Image (cartoon, rainbow, N blue to C red):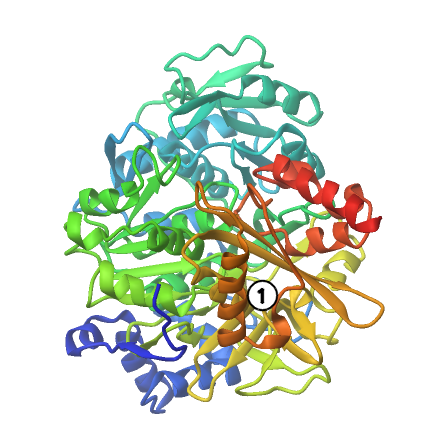
Amino acid sequence: MSFIEEGTLLWKPSAPWLERANIETYVKELEKRTNEQFPDYASLWQWSVTEIEQFWESIWDYFDVTSTTPYDAVLTSRTMPGAKWFTNAHINYTEHIFKQKNNDDPAIIHCTETRQLAEVSWEKLYNDTAQMQHTLKELGVQKGDRVVAYVANTYESVVAFLATASLGAIWSSASPDFGTQSVIDRFSQIEPKVMFTIDGYTYGGKPFDRTDVVSAIQKKLPTLEATIVIPYLQKKPDTSMLMEPIMWEDATSRTNNPILTYEYVEFNEPLWILFSSGTTGRPKPIVQSQGGILLEHYKAVSFHVDLHRGDRFFWYTTTGWMMWNFLVGGLLAGSTIILYDGNPQYPHAEFLWELAERTKMNIFGTSASYITHTMKSGISPKETYDLQHLRSISSTGSPLPPEGFAWCYEHVKKDLWIASISGGTDVCTAFILGVPTIPVYAGELQCRGLGAKVESFSDDGRAVIDEVGELVLTEPLPSMPIYFWDDEDGSRLHDSYFDMFPNIWRHGDYIKITNRGTCIIYGRSDATINRGGIRIGTSEIYRAVDHVDAVVDSLIVEIPDEDDSIVLLFVVLQQNEQLSDEMKQSIRAEIREHCSPRHIPTHMYAVDDLPKTLNGKKLEIPIKRILMGHAVADVVNKDSLQNPDALDYFIQFAETLSK
């Protein structure tokens, strides 16, 4: 793999790109509205984070938000936490989805490991949502009730969510690959009234029956009054072990000619509850508002994803990751969303690229790890698939290295807009994103999102440019949590984001903002390697190690020592490869050249697998704490991992280390 210098110019938008971009239409209207000029994205962003109230009011007007009552104030005060937006406005998220209803394009295209594509019209989506709303009403679901879902990434899951939100009830979902206790840890905190579930799922061609898990979950949710079952493995699954199940077919055929009605809720009332990964304790129940999410997703999918009516928008995700919620938000633009449930490399390693061709995909959303894995596998999608409709690749989950950017242009398509983005479950969006009107530089995220005052702070709280610092938001954002569930005094929320810099959101990542406004994420700030006074983000080391072809994945941790520290590197190798002295020398050489001699690992070890969260993120901090002698139960919840057995190696290693 050839080394690409960070900041290398890879792409510039041509005139057709600029003419087509949604943000250009918005700017023209904004200039008329404000009598100001915005000659470039930088000036537009600066205005949006300075004149915050004017900016978000312009978003409200531009997207013609429907409210049954006028709002009193756009923003009561610029305080964090506690900012109140569009007070006294009453809206409904689902209503705004169906404002886009049309007969020209499908609303949803969905696919599972069977490879069979199915298209769903806007009319069917509306009718099924209305039917499900009717059923939920019969079950007594009202505004503020919690409805949970243990479901796969399928069409039915979207219907269930939209019906829930239409009633002003509060949605929360978990993926069926979550273990029993992991689901109970989440759902038991919020006391749900109704649960949606599937009978099982497939992954890598293998079926996984989950009816016994669902039964165990039901028994731990005393407030649960009904369970609606979505067939997946079987057309008529055995539900004999479940308490009073209602089958999906029955729940969507209760009435003739259903009409969808809307329960209007105050702008700052809950839409859904998302959960943190829960690797180090009970998952945090993050509550976000109907209005805050509505405005943020309108802005993000229209200006930063550049979705148009009829576009086909895909993101590889599960219902346990916030990107599922973000993907559903694509319907706000009148686009077609593409759902895939299953292993991204089944039935073959290039299946998602095949899916892109078959669905005429316009926006391909994935993780940085998927791109780097595809790159190391020697796959070249452009040689096999017709990707003429593909305009953009977006990636998130971890920093995309410069080589990942270059691979997309070389092996996918030359005229391609690459948008590496960063945000989080905490805000259910990205606050550093792309925009199709400015250049793409290798390894750099194009821009800070409109309305998101992202800054890089030094340890003493100064905003810095071209220096690595803490990623902070110094002004409120509408999709920030309105609160954590059952956190009456707000202490848990405060400790999560506001304990380092008073009244300023500290996100927990290291970032550098360049003098041209692009951004580089260096990984979690509490996982940074700091040797001899030189601090470096883990992503930089992973990038260097990735240049050794035999390495599939890696994890690095720094353990404090009496004198300085020891740095341990764990690598997963290609099949039949061994961590020989020669390979160690190659790894050292790459780190020395691309990072610094000070950050060469003290020791290296080959492992079969690296433990990761259910959303695929490496366990850097829990592994570090385990190796420092902390009790495993105090630093990691095994039920929050997709591969808990991988943790056993590190537990045994810690015992050896302590001796």
Q: Is residue 45 above or below residue 541?
A: below
Residue located at (57% from left, 80% from top): 455
Q: Nearer the viewer, residue 349 or 171?
A: 349
The furthest residue to the front: 581
Which quadrant is the N terminus positioned in?
bottom left
Residue located at (33% from left, 87% from top): 40
Q: Is residue 594 above or below residue 127?
A: below
Q: Secondary structure at mark 1?
A: helix
Q: Amino acid at mark 1?
A: Thr
Q: Is residue 314 above or below residue 251?
A: below
Q: Quadrant of residue 638?
A: top right
Residue neighbourhood size for the residue with mark 1, other residues' Cα within 10 Å, grouped as few (<14), some (14–19), many (≥20): many
Give the percent coordinates (x, y) of residue 111: 30, 34
What residue is shown with label 1? 538
Give the percent coordinates (x, y) of residue 256: 32, 23
Instruction: State left or right for residue 626 relative to residue 18.
Output: right
Give the percent coordinates (x, y) of residue 147: 57, 35
Q: Is residue 30 visible?
A: yes
